[in-house]
Amino acid sequence: MVIGSGLAGLSAALRIAAHRDVVIVTKGRLGEGSTSWAQGGIAAAVGPGDTVQAHATDTLVAGAGLADASAAEAVCADAPGVIADLAALGVEFDHDRGRIALAREGAHSLPRVAHAGGDATGRHVIAALALRARRHARIAIIEHRRVEDVLVDERGVHGVRLADGGTIPADRVVLATGGSGHLFARTTNPHGATADGPALARRAGAALVDMEMVQFHPTALAAGPSPLALVSEAVRGAGGMLYDCNGEPVMAGVHPMGDLGPRDVVARAVVRRARETGREVVMSLAHLDPDRVHSRFPEVAALCASHGIDLARDPVPVTPAAHYCMGGALTDLDGRTTVPGLWAVGECAGTGLHGANRLASNGLLEAAVLGRRAADDVASGGRSPADGPRTDPARFTPGEADGDEVRGAIGRIMWRGCGLERDGTGLAGALDALDALPRPADAQAAGLLEIARLTTHAALAREESRGAHFRSDFPDPDPAQAHRTCWAGDTPTAVPSIDLTEVA
Ligand SMILES: Cc1cc2nc3c(=O)[nH]c(=O)nc-3n(C[C@H](O)[C@H](O)[C@H](O)COP(=O)(O)OP(=O)(O)OC[C@H]3O[C@@H](n4cnc5c(N)ncnc54)[C@H](O)[C@@H]3O)c2cc1C
């Protein structure tokens, strides 16, 4: 069984279906999720002069000392194959003079990002994969049903329970439930990104990892309610520049890569400048050819137009927003969690690829690569050993509070206390405020609350600044803390060195 139908879930299901029957359970329509909102594209070393090694090196540099070298090598090595496979499945990547067109994005040393439909990559990818899945004789699809619990006993997984109370037996379950952006009041993620995967994994007793590492995108469109529309990094890659209300360039003198510096650096610069001037930072593309801007970025232009903004001519108000969670269920490079029979792939998993910060366009890549690798493992009969770090499976005891109210309160507490700039006092206050919230009546809000608590705990425990995790009371990296932190129960431990792939 595969839970979720973004790029990770569909990649896994299509590959498993080559060998055996598979059922996809997904809480919205097939294909709904962050993937279909992805704009920039998929990173792969397929351009002239590029190498897998250079891609892996950029990934490790972005990861700020926490990214796992073997994960970076394995995922980057699979990237050209992923692009070829997606093309074979019907994704029409953009081409320029007969070659695949590649965009340059932040912290990449070369143009390396393949895209489709200009900035509509995710939509094109999902359209092709969902069509294949719907037509596949060995794939059964259950839409609009939310998985609320993965059922485990001492031997591992034996099924899932749905939110409506039904259960479905399964001895192999792949979590592909996407991100956790709605931990925060401001996010670029679709409404379904509610940390279901980490919550399901934790309730099943699986270890989580890197929970403090949340990437805030510097340029969400500062218009309308959350989720906020994204102004993709590729827009800055094409020449878009950030200015304050006095017309001063925001990134001048802040980072050698200027507007294309690492996301966390640009995001903090945007927040600080907005705080200093009392006015929003804007992005300007007015110096570029307006026709090219509209044809290269039709999605972003349409999102801006829906707020009365012309992307090519007007100053575009921007603000940081929670965008991507590097952490999730601890897995090896076959997607195995520490619970036998449970795999996790895509944004809900923590393979170690991203470390403390994700390199732009490595998110879709990881979803596709790990979806395929987990599928091969599932199909070949692999299963985690039963002696990995686990906790007793927790069961949800419902309270009476309204789930939506609790979700709203979590978002506000997390944005204020556990956001882009953190400190010990704010984090401790956030933990107290989360603990004081009434117990929600629904398991989904309870899971979000549990993951919010763990994220805040993890941020409090890391007394240094590294990658996306910035503590104003510990503004520098501390070499003694240059290790990933794993959570089985409430006690942080170093990531165990068990190689889950060794034991079948
Ligand atoms: C606006 C935006 C732009 C982005 N642009 C890029 C980009 O250009 N390049 C890049 O690499 N990354 C990008 N990212 C990140 C990237 O899109 C995601 O990390 C990636 O798509 C995650 O894929 P996934 O399959 O893990 O999750 P998703 O695509 O989010 O799919 C998760 C699926 O799980 C289902 N689900 C969740 N919980 C349950 C449950 N309890 N029961 C049943 N089903 C459930 C959902 O309905 C959904 O179908 C972007 C993200 C956003 C939000």
Image: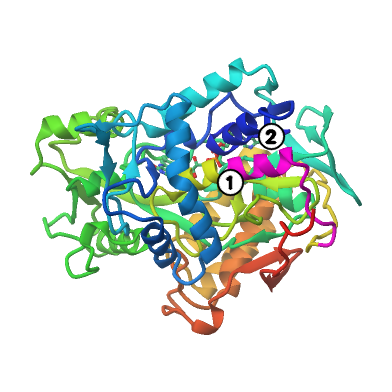
Residue range highlighted in magenta: 370-387
Tell me, yes or no, whether the two marked residues, 2 and 1, touch with CB atoms within 8 Å. Answer: no
Which quarter of the picture shows residue 327?
bottom right
Task: Pinpoint residue 496: horizontal percent, then vertical percent.
Answer: 70, 69
Give SS at disc 2. strand
Left or right: residue 299 versus residue 422 is: left
Left or right: residue 159 versus residue 200 is: right
Q: Amino acid type of disc 1?
A: Leu
Q: How is the image coloured?
A: rainbow
Left or right: residue 310 versus residue 178 is: left
Give SS at disc 1. helix
The stretch drawn in magenta includes residue 372: yes
Q: Earlier in the sequence, mark 2 or mark 1?
A: 2
Compare residues 451 and 368 and report the one nearer the observer.
368
Task: Pinpoint residue 193: horizontal percent, then vertical percent.
Answer: 56, 41
The stretch drawn in magenta includes residue 452: no
Question: Residue placed at 22% from the left, 68% from the top?
Answer: 256
Mark 2 — residue? 2
Mark 1 — residue? 370
Task: Pinpoint residue 160: horizontal percent, then vertical percent.
Answer: 80, 36
Count of marks overlaid on the render:
2
Question: Residue placed at 15% from the left, 36% from the top?
Answer: 312
Compare residues 146 and 182 and report the one nearer the observer.
146
Q: Residues within 10 Å of mark 1 (few under 14, many from 20)?
A: many
Left or right: residue 186 versus residue 500 is: left
Task: Pinpoint residue 184: horizontal percent, then vertical percent.
Answer: 51, 50
**Residue 355 in sight in this render:** yes
Closer to the observer: label 2 or label 1?
Answer: 1
Q: Amino acid type of disc 2?
A: Val
Question: Residue placed at 54% from the left, 49% from the top?
Answer: 411
Q: Is mark 1 within 8 Å of ligand 1?
A: no
